Amino acid sequence: MAKDYYRILGVDKNSTKEEIKKSYKKLAKKYHPDLNKSSDADEKFKEINEAAAILADDQKRTQYDQFGTTADQFKGFEGFDFSDFMSDIGDRFDFDSIFESFFGGGHFRSRRRGPRRGADLRYDLEITLEEAAKGAAKHIVIPRLEQCSKCHGSGAESEADIVNCPDCSGSGMQRRTQRTPFGIFSTTTTCGKCRGQGKYIKKECEVCDGTGVVKKTRKLEVKVPEGAEEGTNLRVVNEGEAGEKGAESGDLYIIIHVKEHEIFERQGDDVYINAPIPFTIAALGGEVEVPTLGGKAKLKIPSGTQNNTIFRMKGKGIPYLHGHGTGNENVEVIVEVPEKLSKKQKELLKEFEKESRKKKGFFGKMF
C-alpha cells in the first residue's frame, strides 16, 4: 500500500509549501532520535523526511497526487543519508537547510562526519555586591575533558596507527539497498566501524584509550566586569571541553550570582540604605557619615529633616554594565528618639515644649 505522506506530515492536500515546511520542522525536531529516545523515533524520522522530499517537489507531488506514487521518486534518495540527520543535530543541525534542499530539487550527498566540537560548560559564580560594583578577578577550578597530551587528540598510539577504514574504504559511509512497494530504495548510512570519520585506529593511545581526551581539572582566572548583576552571563571562548579527535573546544559560560548584602539593597544600578540619625541633627541640621560601596562618605542633613526622608548621593551606586555612568545611592534617614534621658536633657526638652506651645505649633494645637 502506498504511504499517505500528507497524513505523515499532518497536513492536507491543499497545504502550501510553507505549511508543509512548518509541519516538517516541527515533526523532525520531535522525532529526531537524538532528542526522542522512543524505540520508533528512528523509523518515524526517516518517514517524515521521505514524505517531505516528495511533497516539497512540485513534479513529484503532482505525480504522487495522481497515482499515489512517483515513477522516479526514489531516485532522489540515492545517497540520501538519514543517519547524517541524526548525527548532525548535536552540531547545530539546521532543519531549514534540509527542507530548502528538498525545494531546490537538490539531492543530499553522502558526506563524512567530521569530529564533533567539544561540549560547552556552565559554572555558577557567586560574588559580593562590592565585587559587582568594582569588578573583580576570580579564580575558579573547572573539571573538564582536555586534549590528550600524548596523542594530541588523535586517539592513536602513533600516526601510523591511523588508517583508512576497511569497511567503507575511507568514505565514512556505507550504502544499503532495500525493496519497497515503490521499487528499490537505496540509502547511505554512516559506517559503523569508523562512525562516519573514514579513519580507523589500529592501536589506541594507552593514555586516553582512543578517545583523544582525558579528564583533568583546570584553574582559570575570570574577570568579573564592573556593574555585573544577578544572572550576568560571561562567555569564555574555547574553555569548555576538548573536541573530538582534535576538533574545536567548546565554550565556558559563567553565570554570575550576587550575594545578598547586609545593609545595601540593589535595584538596578542604584543602591538603597537606611541611615539612623540623632533627632537633634534632624531638627538643627548637620552632617553625618554614611557607608557607601566605595567607603564612608559625608551626607549633609538640612534642619527640619523628617523621618524617612530619602537623600540621593549621585554616582555612589553601581557602574553601568553597558555604557558609561554610575547609579546613585539613596539614603533613607531614620530619626532616632533616645530611650533614656538625663535630668538636664529632660529639663531642656520641657523648655522646648513650652516654647513650642507659645508659638501655637503642633504641640499648641494638641494641648
Image (spheres, rainbow, N blue to C red):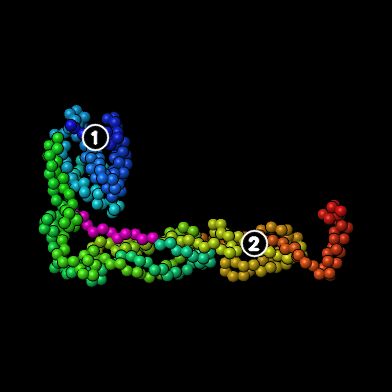
Please name the residue shown 59% across and 62% down the image: 264
Is 6 magenta? The answer is: no
Residue sticking out furthest to the top: 66
* Magenta-drawn segment: 112-122
Q: Nearer the viewer, residue 347 or 75?
A: 347
Circle 1: residue type: Tyr
Residue 9 can be seen, yes or no: yes
Which of the 4 image quadrants contains residue 200? bottom left
Which of the 4 image quadrants contains residue 187? top left
Q: Nearer the viewer, residue 206 or 333?
A: 206
Q: Which of the labelled discs sits on residue 274, or is there none? A: 2
The picture places residue 125, in percent across and down from the top left corner, at: 45, 63
| Residue where numbered disc 1 is placed | 5
Q: Does the CB distance between marks 1 and 2 fall below 8 Å? A: no
Q: Nearer the viewer, residue 367 or 300?
A: 367
Q: In the displayed structure, would residue 367 be above or below residue 315? A: above
Please name the residue shown 36% across and 60% down the image: 121
Which of the 4 image quadrants contains residue 235? bottom left
SS at circle 1: helix
Is 116 magenta? The answer is: yes
Q: Nearer the viewer, residue 237 or 250?
A: 250
Report the side of 229 relative to 181 (left or right): right
